[in-house]
Amino acid sequence: METTKKLEHVAIIMDGNGRWAKSRGLPRVMGHHAGVKAVERTVRAAKELGIPYLSLYAFSTENWKRPRGEVLGLMGLFRYYLRSKLEELCKEEVRLRFAGELTALPEDIVAILDETAEKTKEFRGTQLITCVNYGGRREILDAVNKMLTAGETGPVTEETLQKYLYLPDVPDPDLIIRTSGELRLSNFWLWQSAYSEYYFTDKYWPDFDKQDLLDAVGDYYERERRYGKA
Ligand code: FPP
């Protein structure tokens, strides 16, 4: 049986900020600033297209290895974005949620993430999930450890493990987009991506716009989705 599943969750690996900046002779952090503008455009576009869930890979568990100045710059951008845009996101009825090992983040950022998630939790528009200090392997290990702490006994099923993921109620991504020409998953949504479709574009993330999202979504609907069936 062939199925075309409605697009519920679009996930994006936002890559190429550094190269975008370098190609303009700018410091890397300027690429991240331009990346925030692309985030704003994409959230608006996802809302206009009626996509229920949009997730963005903003900071991976591996990103701590970047130069200290860049890590601090990225943390500063999270603060700035969430503080300055919260009101607007509330007006737009966007629900914000976060996935990752959040407790390892600076304390004030954890507080901002908590406050943002709490203030927007009743909104039923698009959900924007930002993955911060996120790693797919870490998420699975965290889930296993939480299961053990909770005293779950085997056999462990997919449904049991699912309950212990960071955001168990969020549907698996139907479509994963990666910008800047790299063809890797880079530890993003490892468990959840079992049946995801992929879309790659050479564009650097700061150049990504509504038309690019439309192209990716159009491509998704053109594909046959067989879920491993004949
Ligand atoms: C990848 O480009 C981008 C990141 C690791 C950070 C993404 C962060 C943002 C767009 C800003 C903050 C986001 C929110 C939600 C407020 P890269 O630096 O790896 O680029 P390169 O591969 O060209 O070096």
Image (cartoon, rainbow, N blue to C red):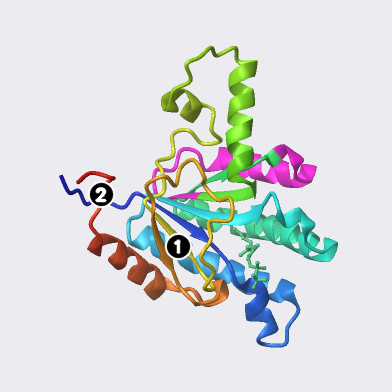
Q: How many marks?
A: 2
Residue 61: % across, % down: 69, 49
Residue 177, label in figure = 1
Q: Provide the secondary structure element on which disc 1 rests.
A: strand
Query: Looking at the image, can residue 201 be seen?
Result: yes
Q: In which quarter of the image is ligand 1?
A: bottom right
| Magenta-highlighted residues | 103-128
- 179 and 1: which is toward the camera: 1
Residue 192: % across, % down: 46, 42
The residue drawn where x is 22% and y is 52% is 4
Q: Distance between the residues labelled 1 and 2?
A: 17 Å
Q: In which quarter of the image is residue 152?
A: top right
Would you say residue 165 sits in the magenta stretch?
no
27 is higher (above) or lower (below) than 75: below
Residue 5, label in figure = 2
Quadrant that contains the N terminus: top left
* Extreme residue in the left direction: 1
Marks 1 and 2: CB-CB under 8 Å?
A: no
- The amino acid type, in three-letter code, at marker 1 is Ile
